[in-house]
Amino acid sequence: MIERIGADLDRGWVSPWLLARAMAGLDAVAPGNVIRVGREIRDAAGLFWTRVPAYQPRGRSHGDVLAGLPGLEYLFLFHADGHFRQAALDRFRGGARNAFAFVAIAYRLNDWAPPVREAAQACAWRVFSQTDPRIAARACVFLLRRSRHWQRWANHTAALDAIFARADVTSHLVEIIGRATTGPMGRLLQAAARQPALDPHLPDLARRAALPVVRADALRMLIAGRATWPMGFERQWIDKRYGLSRRVAVLGGRDIARSCPLEELVALGAADRAIAVRRAAADGLVAHRARLANVDAVIRMLADDASPSIRERIAFVVKERAGAS
């Protein structure tokens, strides 16, 4: 259908019915495929700088067709000519129709052409705030982890950060994270932890998330009273004389307020069926052993754990308490 739209563009007229069918098909495209599918759209529709139509009645150019047909801007986001990408962004009104379109607009915040980035910023402020929070949450699954690696968008992040901070979007994002049974949900949770809107949902994720890594990460944040997330890597010198260094992760962080008593959190983790969550509870026991009121109860729960690493942590606490007495 997009190939037929490209042929129609050469003739200076595109069928609204055909465009509507093509857009309905794009509604089902996963937002994480925006780069690959964007190239396929550009190639199929012939959205290039140097394309010379064989027949173009009345002198109608791509810009003329874009101006006269609502919806075509979704395809022109992937035009090879930055002028058309900018014009497409200027035409967006209302919320994004799907998560794929949401990500495509956000991707233009990192466009190589400065005027396109400026147009994308204005478009993002108009469109994102009016987008259904369920659509925005699906887009955030991709954007939260990827957008921090974009190099050209440093001055154009405010509109997207505002979406990440929205409570209604965060609620739907937490639902996605909590129900998922596969995928990098632990890394997604860490990326989402940049925003305080996540904090009220952490206890529920620690109790009910399907993936153990999510329950463990949520529990660690609550026990530590601090959320952390990866920000990239830096070189750490071992010996400059010999040029020896290593690559180490750089973490960002912020303090969070616990909404549950510390004793309840450690006991919750100790009773979990997953080793990763019980290990988080054991780490919490070691870190806060001097202030926990239920140390003996947690020791009884974990003393005979199947995991050697958990038993080692409990043995350390038991030995220390025996020496102190």
Image (cartoon, grey):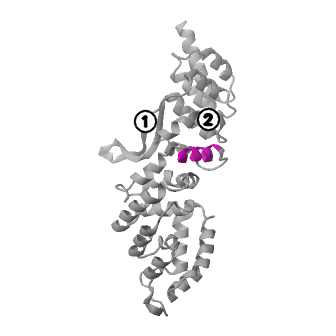
Mark carried by residue 254: 1
Quadrant of the drawing holding the N terminus: bottom right
Residue stretch rendered in magenta on the structure: 168-178
Q: Is residue 1 visible?
A: no
Left or right relative to 118: residue 301: right
- The percent coordinates of residue 47 (x first, y second) are 48, 79
Question: Label 2 is placed on what type of residue?
Answer: Asp
How far from the left and from the top, in percent, is residue 193?
49, 41
Which marked residue is nearer to the observer: mark 1 or mark 2? Answer: 2
Q: Residue at x 63, y 30 (%)?
A: 278
Left-right relation of 68 to 241: right
Please state if 119 lies on the left or on the right of 297 as rendered: left
Quadrant for the C terminus, please.
top right
Locate residue 202: give its quadrant.
Answer: top right
The residue located at (57%, 55%) in the rendering is 135
Q: Label 2 belongs to which residue?
A: 204
Dot 1: within a 10 Å radius of its alpha carbon, few (fewer than 14), some, or many (20 or more) residues? few
Q: Is residue 279 left or right of residue 80?
A: right
Comparing 67 with 280, the one in front is 67
Under circle 2, the secondary element is helix
In front of the other: 284 or 155: 155
Q: Is residue 312 magenta?
A: no
**Quadrant position of residue 3:** bottom right
Looking at the image, the residue that sits furthest to the left is 241
User: Label 1 sits on what residue type?
Assistant: Arg
